[in-house]
Image (cartoon, rainbow, N blue to C red):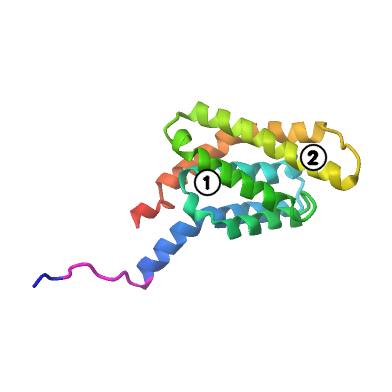
Amino acid sequence: MALNLRRNPGFWQRLDIASRMTFPAASILFGILVLGLPTILPMQGALRPAFVLVSVFFWSLYRPSSLPAPVLALLGLCLDLVGVSPLGVWPVILLLLHALVVQSRRLLVSQGFFMVWLAFIVIAAAACWADWAVQSLLMLRLLPIDASLFQWAVTIGLYPILAAGLIRAHRGAAAPELA
């Protein structure tokens, strides 16, 4: 008769595992809320979608199970509600971003930082263009493209800074394998 030495996790251990698994979505929501506060922060309007694009790209690449589709849709809706775009635009963009990254994950995970950043630059361009195109379509006129290009520049410039912090979180306290 074999002894079963494996114990069921206790309450605190289950809470620890749950908090590590929800860290990506919770940190994105926290960022949306903080960047949605009225402040005098320069470029705050451009920082909100940039922060979300970088975070969703990163977590979709390195921990895709932590951002299921309903959570991504809610995060996109929150982003729309803080005044970035008409309702429904960012949930679709984030879901498409997530799907594209998950499809490319096998190739991208084995690449170095600069190749991943290059892939992000292309994906961020597509996301900024999609936001511009949908808003132009809804307004029934072509909106100036300069705001979208600025959004793209802010987003790709913010990637290395945010990625450094996200890498530390992924390997540190938020890592589910440490639970």
Q: Is residue 6 magenta?
A: yes
Label 2–label 1 contact, CB within 8 A: no
SS for dot 1: helix
**Residue designated by label 2:** 133
Residue drawn 44% across the image and 46% down it:
170
- Picture quadrant of residue 69: bottom right
Pick the residue in front: 87 or 114: 87
- Picture quadrant of residue 111: top left
The label number, if any, that marks residue 6 in the structure image: none
- Position above or below: 11 against 64: below
Amino acid type, residue under disc 1 in the picture: Ser
Residue drawn 51% across the image and 26% down it:
114
- Picture quadrant of residue 142: top right
**Residue designated by label 1:** 60
Q: Is residue 80 magenta?
A: no
The percent position of residue 19, horizontal first and vertical second, equals: 46, 61
SS for dot 2: helix
94 left or right, relative to 66: right
56 left or right, relative to 151: left
The percent position of residue 14, horizontal first and vertical second, equals: 38, 67
Residue 84 in view in this figure: yes
Magenta segment, principal secondary structure? loop
The percent position of residue 103, horizontal first and vertical second, equals: 52, 41
Magenta span covers which residues?
4-11
Circle 1: is it few (<14), some (14-19), or many (20+) Cα within 10 Å?
A: many
Pick the residue in front: 174 or 85: 85
Amino acid type, residue under disc 2 in the picture: Ala
Structural distance between the alpha carbons of marks 2 and 1: 24 Å
Of tags 2 and 1, the one toward the viewer is 2
- Position above or below: 148 against 171: above
The percent position of residue 49, horizontal first and vertical second, equals: 69, 45
Circle 2: is it few (<14), some (14-19), or many (20+) Cα within 10 Å?
A: some
